[in-house]
Amino acid sequence: MSVLAVNGLSKAFGGVRAVSGVSFAVDAGELLAMIGPNGAGKSTCFNMINGQLAPDSGSIELEGKSLVGKAPREICRSGVGRTFQVTATFGSMTVRENVQLALLSHARAQGSLFSSMEESFLDEAHKLLQQVGMREQADRQCALLAYGDLKRVELAVALASRPRLLLMDEPTAGMAPAERGALMQLAAGLARGEKIAVLFTEHDMDVVFGHADRVIVLADGELIAEGSPTEVRANAQVRSVYLGGEYGDA
Amino acid sequence: MKLLCLLALLLVSTGVSAQTIKIGELNSYKVFPAFLEPYKKGMELALEEINRAGGVNGRKLELVSRDDGGNPGDAVRVAEELITRENVALLTGTFASNIGLAVSNLAAQRKIVFIAAEPLTDKMVWENGNRYTFRLRASTYMQTAMLIPEAVKLKKVRWAIVYPNYEYGQSATASFKKLLAKAQPGVQFVAEQAPPLGKIDAGAVVQALIDAKPEAIFSSLFAADLQKFVREGNLRGLFKNTSVFNLLGGEPEYLDPLKDETPEGWWVTGYPWSEIRTPAHQKFLDAYRKRWNDYPRLGSVVGYAAIYSAANAIRKAGGTDTEKLIAALKGLEMDTPFGPIVYRAHDHQSTMGAYVGQLSARGGKGRMVNWRFADGANFLPPFEEVRILRKE
Amino acid sequence: MSYSSILIQFLNGLASASSLFLVAAGLSLIFGVTRIVNFAHGSLYMLGMYLAVWLAERVGFWAAVPLAAAIVALFGSVVEISLLRRIYKAPELLQLLATFALLLVIKDAALWIWGPEDLLGPRAPGFTGAVGIAGGAFPQYELLLIVLGPVVFVFLQLILSKTRWGILVRAATQDREMASALGVNQRWLFTGVFVLGALLAGLGGALQVPREPANLMVDLTVISDAFVVVVVGGLGSIPGAFLAALLIAEIKAFCIGLGFSEATLVMEFMVMAAVLVLRPWGLLGRMPAEARGAGTAQQPLARPSPRLLRMLVALVAALALVPLASGGYTLVLLTDVLIFALFAVSLHFIMGPAGLYSFGHAAYFGLGAYAAGILFLQGKMPMELALALAPLAAGFGALVFGWFCVRLSGVYSAMLTLAFAQIVWSAAFQWDALTGGSNGIVGIWPAPWLASKTAYYFLTLLFCALGISFLWKAIYSPFGYALRAGRDSPLRADAIGIDVRAAQWAAFAIAGLAAGISGALYAFSKGSISPEAMGIQRSVDGLVMVMLGGIQTLTGPVWGAALYTWLQDAAARNIDYWRALVGIVILALVLAVPQGLGTLVQGRK
């Protein structure tokens, strides 16, 4: 069974169809890239899956359980991790504390008044930071980190809740080209190792074709192509959609 | 060496203060400066006079004056400081009712005499009265009662009332309604306006009163509220065919700013300082003008009489022992610029009176005319009533 | 009410609305662009009044009005350039502290220059009489005001929509960072806006002269009215301010007209509470743009070093030894300091880690104090039991109000806390039978075994030390981190499964409970309690203590409370113009240690 199964997803804003009848699935350990030109419906689609928007129709299931109608917080609780286009971390805390808090929250102990944060999930936090290569910077305040490092912290935080599905919105946006590959390499490695399904959107086609296992293409709110990077790259419709667009630049 | 000098200095200074008798005073100088600056001048004048005459029982008086911060919590702390650090013989002062009551309550707890100088609340000596607290000024009840004879004479049926929405205004209103209804059965109270203190929406209040078509108005507004009320009322013709009674309206503190807009014919309680010809007042007036190059306000008289009350009590008690001071103050008879007063033994209220008269504008200034002195002794309820109130 | 009186009350409302709008418009502009909560705006208005009265005697009323406004504007520019400009980068709300200090200084300066007596200015020449309207007399000057308000409104709208400067102001109001990215010279934009705001305040004050004597109380009454109008209208929205002024003035006029004048005591706060609950950004306000970038990151709340912990333990030990060395007044003062320290720490608990501003924290202090008094005197409970149960009333109050407040953010949430506090205050003020009305409750003294100063001091020390250490420990518990998470990044907090609102709500209740403990201790230490204990002034005191100590420090609020309480006590004892002295000391501290006293103790990371 797929980890994420999306069927017939539709959303209209005041009569304008932003997404219509989109269906796809992501398997455990698989990296699925969702691409398309601006206005194709990627963000709308993404926000319906993460709970910020309610779909007009269609189903979203995580391991057979519907996510429709759930708040973002509940969706997280049911096993979905997220990273944001502009990194969202807790700037006033150290790198370690960011991860510790995510681990505590996953264990539903974030409301505890009487335990000490310092000792909580220390080993697990260090292990996660080790995995993303941030162990050495564990004591630094997040607000002072370089952007690339912040992305890694965010990845560790997202993984702390042991997600079965990881949603990454433009994971390499704002990064230097040289760092992009490294981050995706890391994410892909972790996902495959932990059998996590990954759905990501991305503008950088090098990233998409370099790291995705499969690609789905949206245009005008509809799914126009699906397949391996090679197949999609060869798809005539995709080429015409992207003509003069980002693909041409990439 | 330095240390020795310091020590010597300390000894000398404590030696000096051992010879003086300290009177602790606290007041909301920053909240009600218009009343309290003249009040302070009155106190200082009295202090100088007493000390020039050799002090009390051969010892000089020392006034330790403090700002009470304008709230009861700080006032209690300041009073504690006066009691414990300054070792004052007794406490005096305070302006607002709530602060007066808080300090009175502390005085009972710490067993020290408190002569409340200005607070008008009836509760000070009645419902919340205690054996340590005495009050100098004519209370809200007394001053209201002083206006009642004139109010009854007018034989007006429809009365409207306007008062600042807090203890003073509320109890003035309650007393007025009770006393007038008793003296003049059939009187109607057709409107009541209770604007927040210092925030009267004068235009709307005046219009609401006009709508009620009263024949007479009883007001206990003062300060900025009174000035706004007068101006709007004049402009809108509220006072044209309406008699107005205004508690405290003749006190120079509140009358003087009205200048040529002083409404004609209002009945008020107050202090016509320039026209009182009694020897006691003349002496005070001359001394005050000489000392401060200014004319006295009502606050000046209150401050002056408060210090004399303290001095006389200490003199009569022959010392500063609290129990002896209480005994001395009970029934203490003394002179004030307003004439002789007695601190009544059973409720600790002094019989200090007030002047009742009518307002008039002459030469761009407001003044009181047709005034008479109302002796406080004549406007106090009988002993039995007071005893019930004091829960004794 | 007859038709004619309805009409006249409506006109009365319009006239009041005009004068309310003038002062609120300036405040709204200043907040919209600079994000300064200008506490001294009422003082600028007061200056305008005094100047106009003073000048009117010399140059006539009509020349005095523009002149007074211009002088106030000039004064505003001096304030902005020499003071506020230095602290734009400082933690949020620090400007509030600076402008509060300014308020103290201006008040004493006005007392010194113009004396204590109210100054009733002249009527406006040409508008001294009344005209007949619907059978009643209506002052000509009020008619003039009714016209002037909209004229100023249109004039402002024209400036804001037609001039380049105005467009920049609007851009900055909507999105400050965007405006600065567009190359707007922020410094002069800020100065310009502050001067315009000051000009409007001065003008409003000067124009009020024919209706109201210049007096020293007016600064505070005006500032609270103006804040309400600005928030009800929507921060930074001039049309909103106009609409809100109209709404509030008319509601008040008709309350009075219909004979519910007591209600005007809190009517504006009830309106504000209702508007904020129903329309969180005010009538015409917009949701503020989310602040972006690293510039908004909060300072870390460093874990106390072992050295600091040892120091704190030593401090408590030293405090416990004080009664051996000194009795009497030192204990009284220290009791106050301890009580306010707990109060300030409880306020800091929601302001620092949770990032929730509260302008009405005194409500919980007051609820605790009143509950103690009522349980003790009316409920005839033993003092110990009353002291133990009273904080629950405060906690319950915080639970109820907090539910609404955590649904808003920033200054809106803060103003809702203020509205609730004022509503509670007015209940205490008016509910004679239960609370003793404006006199309050007297005779709340501790049980005999706690009656001595030393015993009560120990009790206070115990409760406050326990309360403070509990709150401090909670800051470093997972709950405390969850609060900070909600403040730093609500998006991320949500994404890792933290219910930010629930956490904030709980924090609100805990802080209320702790404030209630301090309030109950206060009541028994003073023997009485009256509405001032939960007035705006007490809330402001709390803010001043927290800001003085440093909002992003741990121990700061304690030092802030100690310094402020001691300073007030010492200054008031030694000089007449103590308010100005307190103001000047605060200003000096704001400029010298903008991050707060706490940083001096624990150092910066």
Image (cartoon, coloured by chain):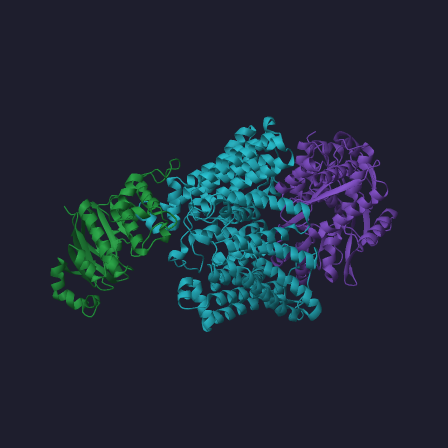
Q: Nearer the viewer, residue B189 or B365?
A: B365
Which x, y percent locates residue C326?
Answer: 63, 33
Looking at the image, residue C212 sits to the left or right of residue A61; the answer is right
- Chain letter tied to green: A
Q: Is residue A66 above or below residue C443?
A: below
Question: Can the viewer see residue C391?
Answer: no
Q: Nearer the viewer, residue C26 or C496?
A: C496
Residue A129 percent coordinates (x, y)? 28, 46
Name the image quarter holding the N terminus of chain C.
bottom right
Residue reaching furthest to the top: C449
Question: Residue C589's spot in the image, x, y percent?
Answer: 55, 52
C308 or B85, which is in the foreground? C308
Q: Answer with left or right where residue B297 lies relative to residue A198.
A: right
Q: Please, is residue B253 above or below residue B330 in the view?
A: below
Quadrant assignment, res B226: bottom right
Residue C91 seen anywhere in this rendered image of the structure? yes
Q: Name the outermost residue toward the right.
A: B279
**Left or right of residue A127, residue B154 in this image:** right
The spot of residue C560 in percent (x, y) is: 54, 45
Colour chain B appears in: purple
| Residue nearest the viewer, comparing B319 with C236 | B319
Circle count: 0
Chain painted in cyan in the figure: C
Question: Residue shown at 18%/54% (left/top)?
Answer: A32
User: Is C556 left or right of A23, judged from the image as shown?
Assistant: right
